[in-house]
Amino acid sequence: MAEYRNIIYDKPADKVARVTLNRPERMNAMSPELLAELDSAMDEFEQDPELSVMIIRGAGRSFCAGYDLGIDQKRGSGSRIMRDRAAMQGLVTRWMRLWGLLKPTIAQVHGHCIAGGTELAGHCDLIFAAEDATFGNQPGRTMGILPTMSMWPTMMGPRRTKELFFTGDPFTARQAHDWGLVNRVYPRERLDEETLNYASRVAMVSVELLMLHKAAVNRYLEVMGIRAAEQSAADLDVIAHETDTVRNWMRMIKEKGLKAALEARDGPFRQ
């Protein structure tokens, strides 16, 4: 088993793996190091013949607050647009890798699940949420679009997705359940137990059949064009990054700091 610093990888039950995002002081915001460890954990899970299903959850008060905006993301070489496009397409590759894992995955969501956090949860096969969970893409107000759209159009339909994207307003676990994004909602104190109980039931089915059940459903979405849709969304996000709105907001972060920029973005929506 690999050594991890930003996640915890354990096996809480027979045939069940569990990944815990472990940056609670940052609401599990995803740093490059955390993402690299998540990639490694996906490989470890998929290659272990003794494992059938994986749970992904977050430590502390939130599932995941998205990408860590406090860390400068290295974008490689080439022009600004070339670097940006490579980075955004890289995000699509990572989340489609999660979506395409041979064996089932369950996102166990509590607290905040924002922006990139919704990409992580959305590309798991199932989402079990606590009653206190909130979802949203507030960065869409000033930073661009979600490169993968977090599977929202697929799970919730285009009209609901547009309604949520247009304002960036957060929505509750109950709303997410009613709209088809979340499978089940539990009281916070029962979420761990209920998710693990379900994962253990999944693990009672042979892993060969689990893989084929998953492949059949995923193949349907691939025929419908899910991969091309996400790649296209990532390119549109690159275009969004060249708009005055996004460039001005990124300049505000550098000049006034992230806290002030977030207040300028979100403050008017709280009125």
Image: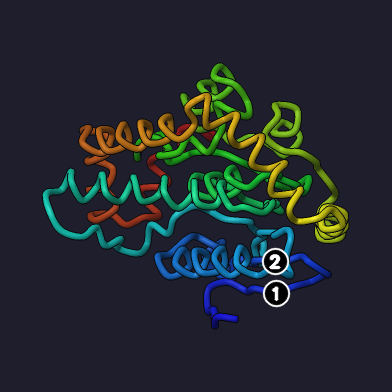
Instruction: Give the image quarter of residue 189.
Output: bottom right
Residue furthest top as drawn? 159
User: Residue drawn at (71%, 53%), measured in percent from left and top?
Assistant: 108
Label for residue 253? none
> How far from the left and from the top, in percent, is residue 11?
74, 73
| Count of numbered tags | 2
Q: Secondary structure at mark 1?
A: strand
User: Residue drawn at (78%, 66%), measured in percent from left and top?
Assistant: 15
Give amino acid for label 2: Arg
Give amino acid for label 1: Asp
In the displayed structure, 68 sits above or below 151; it is below
In the displayed structure, 219 sits above or below 212; it is above
Kindly identify which residue carries mark 1.
Answer: 10
Chosen colour scheme? rainbow
- Specify whether 2 is left or right of 9: left
Kindly identify which residue carries mark 2.
Answer: 18
Query: What is the quadrant of the N terminus in the image?
Result: bottom right
- Specify whether 6 is left or right of 229: right
> How far from the left and from the top, in percent, is residue 149?
48, 35
- Specify whether 188 is left or right of 266: right
Label 2 CA crowd tier, 10 Å (few <14, some 14–19, many 20+): many
Q: Who comes first in sequence, dot 1 or dot 2?
A: 1
Q: Is residue 123 visible?
A: yes
Kindly check if marks 1 and 2 are in contact, taking CB atoms under 8 A apart as contact. Answer: yes
User: Residue drawn at (44%, 55%), measured in percent from left and top?
Assistant: 67
> How far from the left and from the top, in percent, is residue 180?
70, 29
Instruction: Give the image quarter of residue 145.
Output: top left
Q: CA distance from mark 1 to mark 2?
A: 5 Å
> How far from the left and from the top, in percent, is residue 202?
82, 53
